[in-house]
């Protein structure tokens, strides 16, 4: 198992460590609910250094990214980030990712930890122009500080005016005397905050500086479990659960990052899906009785017919009810539809609701 540069800190804080995407990662510290509320109400700090980082640069870099991603790279200006996905040849999703435009010929790509090798091979396969690609995943750390007080805490450590960095934009600056940190107004919690990319050797120093700066703000160290409940309350997809090589962006509700005003892999297949419609969709649902839906549970109709499967589920710490995502067959994916989740051979009622949950 790989370890991030912050492994020793997690152990010293008493974190419960688990294997995740080939890494030993902290799943929780003080407790999932406490960490969840810290992010929603104050601030939380996460080690997400297991994520992959690629640099794509030089002549032809924009053209390569236009070909392999679903979103339109032309919409990016210097200092702007874009959520996108890599469609495969069958219209499925190789990975979802964020692309950062540094200059016209230099881009920074952040991919899921479990897909680093797969993504690299996919990009290399289509890199016919010999665009310069660098896999910096093993050399870089990623620390996320999230929550309504995250900006105030981080501003204590940098002269970069954080209020001048809009959502899905970034700046490269000095944080806690560490130079060349990518300061990104992004995150997967839905509570605001920043993601900080830097070299491994400075990760411990930055973590300590952030935790010291956040002492009076209720800042808590948070693990993967709270990250999961936070993202699920906002209806954000998790690769491997809610999206994968067999799910199309249109089925997954990611039509908004699929732009048909350019050429890209599987454009013809996805265009057909857009015109004809899809047979199933990823929906959000809320349990109507006390029950917790889990990944893999069957979704059935009133007469017990199989409609789909739960891809993500939890007890929402904020709403205190069971919530989940599931692929459901037409026409049952319409908002307000009554469905049932099969839990221990009982069909528990649920309702299709609009995302996000909170």
Image (cartoon, grey):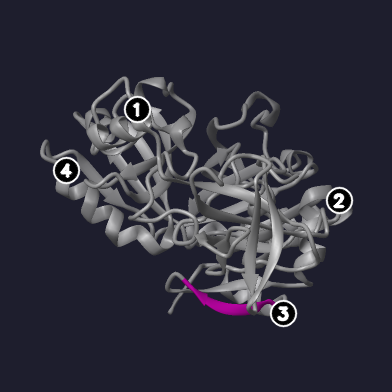
Per the model, the C-alpha gap separating discs 3 and 1 is 53 Å
Q: Which residue is mark 1?
A: 275
Q: Earlier in the sequence, mark 4 or mark 2?
A: 4
Q: Which residues are magenta?
A: 14-20
Closest to the observer: 61 or 241? 241
Q: Quadrant of residue 65?
A: top left
Which numbered mark, 3 or 1, is in the foreground of this view? Answer: 1
Closest to the observer: 218 or 175? 218
Residue drawn at x 62%, y 51% as measured from the top left: 144
* Residue 290 percent location from the top left of the image: 80, 67
Q: Which residue is mark 3?
A: 14
Describe the element under mark 2 as helix, strand or loop.
helix
Q: Which SS does the magenta portion mostly show?
A: strand
The N terminus lies in quadrant: bottom left
Q: Earlier in the sequence, mark 1 or mark 2?
A: 2
Q: Earlier in the sequence, mark 4 or mark 3?
A: 3
Per the model, the C-alpha gap separating discs 1 and 4 is 27 Å
Which numbered mark, 4 or 2, is in the foreground of this view? Answer: 4
Residue 217 is labelled as 2
Residue drawn at x 43%, y 21% as measured from the top left: 77
Residue 115 located within the stretch drawn in magenta: no
* Residue 261 percent location from the top left of the image: 31, 20
* Residue 288 percent location from the top left of the image: 78, 58
Per the model, the C-alpha gap separating discs 4 and 3 is 44 Å
Which numbered mark, 1 or 2, is in the foreground of this view? Answer: 1
Relative to residue 276, is residue 354 depicted above or below?
below
Residue drawn at x 60%, y 79% as measured from the top left: 17
Per the model, the C-alpha gap separating discs 4 and 2 is 47 Å
Residue 126 is labelled as 4
Q: Earlier in the sequence, mark 1 or mark 4?
A: 4
Q: Visible in this render: residue 223?
A: no
């Amino acid at each position: 198992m790989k370890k991030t540069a912050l492994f020793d800190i997690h152990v010293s804080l008493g974190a419960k460590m688990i294997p995740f995407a080939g890494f030993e990662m902290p799943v929780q510290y003080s407790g999932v609910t406490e960490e969840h509320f810290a992010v929603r109400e104050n601030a939380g700090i996460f080690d997400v250094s297991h994520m992959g980082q690629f640099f794509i640069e030089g002549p032809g870099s924009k053209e390569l990214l236009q070909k392999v991603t679903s979103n339109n790279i032309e919409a990016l200006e210097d200092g702007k980030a874009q959520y996108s996905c890599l469609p495969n040849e069958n219209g499925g999703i190789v990975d979802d990712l964020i692309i950062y435009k540094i200059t016209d010929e230099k881009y920074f790509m952040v991919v899921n930890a479990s897909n680093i090798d797969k993504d690299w091979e996919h990009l290399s396969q289509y890199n016919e122009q010999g665009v310069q690609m660098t896999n910096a995943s093993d050399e870089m750390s990623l620390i996320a500080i999230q929550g309504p007080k995250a900006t105030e805490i981080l501003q204590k450590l940098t002269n970069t005016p954080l209020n001048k960095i809009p959502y899905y934009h970034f700046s490269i600056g000095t944080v806690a005397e560490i130079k060349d940190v990518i300061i990104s107004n992004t995150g997967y919690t839905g509570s605001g905050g920043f993601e900080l990319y830097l070299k491994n050797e400075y990760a411990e120093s930055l973590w300590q500086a952030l935790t010291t700066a956040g002492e009076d703000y209720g800042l808590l160290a948070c693990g993967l479990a709270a990250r999961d409940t936070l993202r699920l309350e906002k209806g954000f997809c998790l690769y491997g659960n809610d999206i994968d090589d067999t799910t199309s962006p249109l089925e997954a509700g990611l039509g908004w990052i699929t732009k048909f005003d350019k050429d890209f892999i599987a454009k013809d297949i996805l265009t057909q899906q857009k015109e004809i419609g899809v047979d199933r969709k990823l929906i959000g649902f809320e349990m109507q009785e006390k029950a917790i839906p889990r990944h893999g549970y069957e979704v059935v109709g009133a007469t017990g017919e199989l409609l789909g499967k739960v891809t993500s589920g939890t007890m929402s710490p904020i709403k205190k009810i069971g919530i989940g995502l599931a692929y459901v067959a037409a026409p049952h994916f319409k908002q307000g539809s009554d469905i049932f989740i099969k839990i221990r051979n009982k069909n528990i009622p649920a309702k299709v609701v609009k995302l996000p949950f909170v």
